[in-house]
Image (spheres, helix red, strand yellow):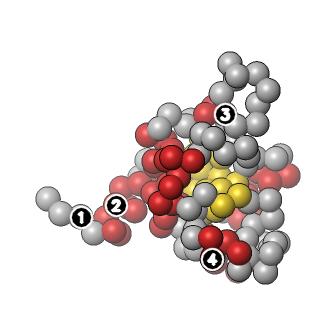
Amino acid sequence: MHYTAQDLVAQARAVIEEIDSERLRALLADGVPVIDVREPEEFAAGRVPGAVNIPRGVLEFQVDGHPALNFRTDPHLSHRQDPVVLYCRTGGRSALAADTLRRLGFDRPLSLAGGYTQWLDAGGAVEGA
């Protein structure tokens, strides 16, 4: 059986949690890490304040070593139980990324529904633009 990219995104959305901009604002206030899975050029053009850039293409290889997620001083405490928010331009790549993190053992990967575009439309703050 062959799938389209849209099929894969739909499958991911069926097993992950998507959040809206209001929920993202609350999570940002609580210090939850936010990962922008867009390409570096997109990230440089503007991002959610405090977001770190780990492009979708290297996420699986870099997520465990990134200081924003691996900030615990006790090596026995794992960041995998904590929520982490992912976003991209419109929400497709971040849904796939959240599903990947779920499969890697993260308990609470969250994807921003509608992505950075929706964040902007909702009047979200922007950094680096």
Q: Which residue is mark 2?
A: 8
Q: Nearer the viewer, residue 25 or 116?
A: 116
Horizontal and vertical percent position of residue 92: 48, 67
Q: Residue at x 50, y 55 (%)?
A: 58
- Among the two numbered marks 3 and 4 on one chain, the one whose residue lies closer to the N terminus: 4
Q: Which of the labelled discs sits on residue 17, or is there none?
A: none
Residue 106 seen from this side: yes
**CB under 8 Å between discs 2 and 1:** yes
Quick one: quadrant of the C terminus? bottom right
Q: Mark 3: which secondary structure?
A: helix
* Neighbour tally class for label 1: few under 14, some 14-19, many 20 plus, Cα within 10 Å: few
Q: Quadrant of residue 6?
A: bottom left
In the current view of this chain or complex, which residue is farthest to the right? 29
> Within 10 angstroms of label 2, few (less than 14), some, or many (20 or more) residues?
some
Gap in Å between the C-alphas at discs 3 and 4? 28 Å
Cα–Cα span, label 2 and label 4: 25 Å
Label located before the other in sequence (2 or 1): 1
* Mark earlier in primary sequence (2, 4): 2
Q: Secondary structure at mark 2?
A: helix
**Residue 79, numbered label:** 3
Marks 3 & 1, CB-CB < 8 Å contact: no
Location of the N terminus by quadrant is bottom left
Circle 4: is it few (<14), some (14-19), or many (20+) Cα within 10 Å?
few
Q: Point out which mark residue 3 bears.
A: 1
Residue 57, given in percent of the width and then of the height, sits at 47, 60
Residue visible at 73% across and 71% down in the picture: 47
> Residue furthest toward the top?
76
Check disc 4 and report the residue beneath it. Answer: 41
